[in-house]
Image: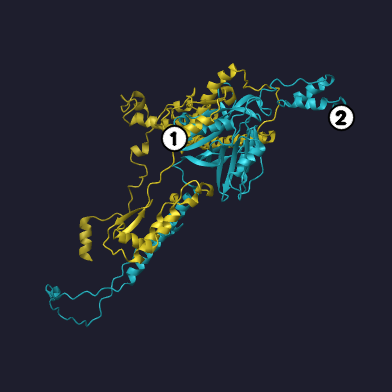
Amino acid sequence: MAASKRKRGGEGPADKKGKFVVDEGEAQVETKKATRNEVLVPAPVSMGKWTNKERVLIFSSRGINFRTRHLMQDLRTMMPHSKADTKMDRKDKLFVVNEVCEIKNCNKCLFFEAKKKQDLYMWISSCPHGPSAKFLVQNIHTLAELKMTGNCLKGSRPLLSFDPKFDKEPHYALLKELFIQTFSTPRYHPKSQPFVDHVYTFSIADNRIWFRNYQIIEEDASLVEIGPRFVLNLIKIFQGSFGGPTLYENPNFRSPNLHRRELRLAAAAKVREKQMVKELQKIKRKEAKEDIDEDVTADVFVTPNEEKPVHIQTEPPAPKVVKKNKHKAFKRQRMQRGRR
Amino acid sequence: MLVLLSVFLGRNFCSTTCFRSASLHFLSTRPASYMPTMESAEEESLHDQSSEEEAGELSDGELQEAFSKGLLKPGMNVLAEKNKKFVNNVGGLKQCLADFRKDLPWVERLDMTNLPAEGVLSKPEEKVPAGINSELDADDDFQREMFFYRQGQATVLEALPLLKVHNIATKRPDDYFAEMAKSDQQMQKIRQKLITKQMILERSEKAKKLREQRKFGKKVQIEVIQKRQKEKKAMMSAVKKYQKGMTDKLDFLDGDQKAAKNSSDASKKAVAKKGPNAKRKYKDQRFGFGGKKSGKKWNTKESFNDVSGFRAKMAHDKGARKGKGGNKNKRPGKSVRRKMKGRS
C-alpha cells in the first residue's frame, strides 16, 4: 500500500497530512480505500484553528517508585498536549529544568521529584518567567486500579471543576489559573478528540487540594471515576519558574521528615521515661534505710499481762474427732466436671 | 533574631558547665522549622538564613562579653525562638496573577467553579456541606467523596447547555472507534473483578438464606412432631376414658376417620354390653335399690301352689341330718363334768 502511494507521485505526504487530523481508526482506513482514485484527500475541518499552543513537559527526577512512574504515564495519557523527557539527574540544580523546557519548546512543566524513595514532590510551573509552585503529593491512585471503572477517550478534552474556595484567597486564585492553563487541552489540538466526556475536579479540604477524574456517562450528569487521583499539599509559591522570590508559604505544611522525626522522638521519649522510672525504683530499693531513733516515751502505755497458771499435761490429749467430709466425692465430681 | 529570655533561678550564671547543658538542651528542642536543612537546598539561598551565624554567637567569650555589657541577666537563660513569619505576599500574588493570566475564551478553557449540586435522590445521611463556608471533613471518606462527586455533577449540569451552544458534542456515537485511555484488556479485568464480586455476594446471600431456611425448617419440623404427639396422646386418653365407661360418646372418633379402629371398638363394646349386665340387672332387680320392685317379695298363686321344693323326709324329720346330729365328740354337761372331776 505504501508503494502504491509513492507511485502516484507526491500523494504520500499529502495523505499523511490528511491523516494528521483526529484519528478515526477504521473509518479513516475505509475512506482512504474509497478515495484511492481521488488525487487529494481534503484537509481536516479544524486545520489551522489550533491557536492555543500550550505544551506541558512531564518528567521526573531519579529515584521514583512504580506508583509515581504510573502516575506520570497516566497524566501523559490524559493530556495529549504533553511531552515526555528522560529522568533528570539530582546533581543538576533546579533551574536546569527551565532549559530543558526551552529545548522541548514547552511552556508549562510538571516535574516530579522523589526524595528518600518515600516522599514525592511535584513542581508545576510556567516555564520562561511565570510563577511556579511546589507540592507534596499524597494518596496516589493510578488508572490501573480495578476499583475505578470508568473509561474515556484518549486525549479527549476535559471539563475543569473548581471549588468556590479557590476564589477566596489570592494564592488559591493563582493556583487555579495555573491549573487551568496546564490541565485544559487546547481546542483543535491535533491529538485531541472532539468529544468532551470527562471532568477533572479540584477541591479544597483540610488545607489540601484533592484531584479527581470522572467520566460523564449520561446527559443527566451521572459520573463514574476513571482515575488517577491524588492529593496536593502546597508548600510554596514562587514568583519565578523554579526559583525567584517566595510569594506564598503554607503555614500548615509540615515536612514529612519532620513528621517522621516527631514520631520517632515520641517513641524514644516513651522508652526513656519507662527506663527512668525503672531506675528510680531500683535506687529506692537499694537505698540504705534510715535508722529510727528510739522513742523514750514509747513504753508509757505498755502493760504486762496477768500471770497464767502453768498447766503440765500428764495425760495425752484426746484424739481429735475426724469428721468425715461427706462432700468430698461431690467436690471431686464437681472438679472433674469443671475440668471437662 | 534570637530573643533570650532570662529565667531567674537563683543560680550563678557564670558556671559555664551549667550553661553548656542548657544550651545543648535548647538546641535540641528548637523546632525544626527553624532549621534550614529540612527544605530543599535551592530555597536556602532564597531565605536570609542566619542561624549559622547565631550558633557561632554562643561561644563562651562572646557570652561573657555580653554579660559584662549587661545584655544578659543572671539566672538560667533559655533560647526561645521568635514566631516564624510565613511569607504571604498578597500584593505580589495578585500582581503575578494579573501578569500571568491569559484571557482565553471559555471554549478553550472549559473551566467552571461551582458548589456541589443537590442530587435528585439526596439522602438524609449524606450531609454534604453545601455552603461555601462549611468545612469539609477530610477524614469522613464517604462525605468527602460525595462532595467531590456532587461538585463534578454540578459542573456537568451547568456546562452541558453551554457546550451545546458552542456545538461541542459530549456523546460519542456508536460507530466512532478510537483509542481509549484504558485499554480493552484493562476494561476486561475490571469487568471480571466486578463479576466475581457480584458472584461472591450472591453466593454468600444464598448460603445465608439456606442457613436461615434450615433453622426455620428444623423449627417447623419440631412443631409438627410435637403436634402429632399431642394429638396421639389426646386420642389415647379419650379411648381409654370410653373403655372405662366414663364417657359414652364417640365424638372423638370423628376427628380421624380410621375404619379399622372404628370396627374393633364397636365389637369390643358389644361384648362388654351383654355379659355382666344381665346378672347385674337381675340382682339389682331383686335386692338392689334400682330396678322393678312392687310385690316381688310376696307369694303369688303360682308360687303357693308350687310344691316342687317339698321334701317329705325333711318335713317328717326322717332325712339325714346334714351335720348337726350324731356328734360323737359331744362334750358332757357341767354336772357330769363336775362329778368326773371330783372322781379323778
Say which chain is yellow. B
Q: How many C-alpha atoms fall within 10 Å of the one at disc 1: few (<14), some, or many (≥20)? A: some
Residue A196: give x, y in percent of width and height: 61, 25
Of A163 and A307, the residue lying toward us: A163
Q: Which residue lies furthest to the top in this view?
A: B165
As drawn, the label of residue B121 is: none
Count of marks placed on residues: 2
Q: Which residue lies furthest to the right in this view?
A: A7
The amino acid on which the numbered mark 1 sits, given as a three-letter code, is Val
Could you tell me if residue B112 is visible in this image?
A: yes
As drawn, the label of residue B90 is: 1
Q: Is A43 placed left or right of A154 in the picture?
A: right
The answer to which image quadrant residue B61 occupies is: bottom left
As drawn, the label of residue A3 is: 2
The tint of chain A in the picture is cyan
Element type at marker 2? helix
The answer to which image quadrant residue A71 occupies is: top right
Chain letter for mark 2, please: A
Of B12 and B148, the residue lying toward us: B12
The vertical placement of A21 against B198, above or below, is above
Could you tell me if residue A269 is visible in this image?
A: no
Residue B199: give x, y in percent of width and height: 61, 35
Q: Residue at x 30, y 74 (%)?
A: A288
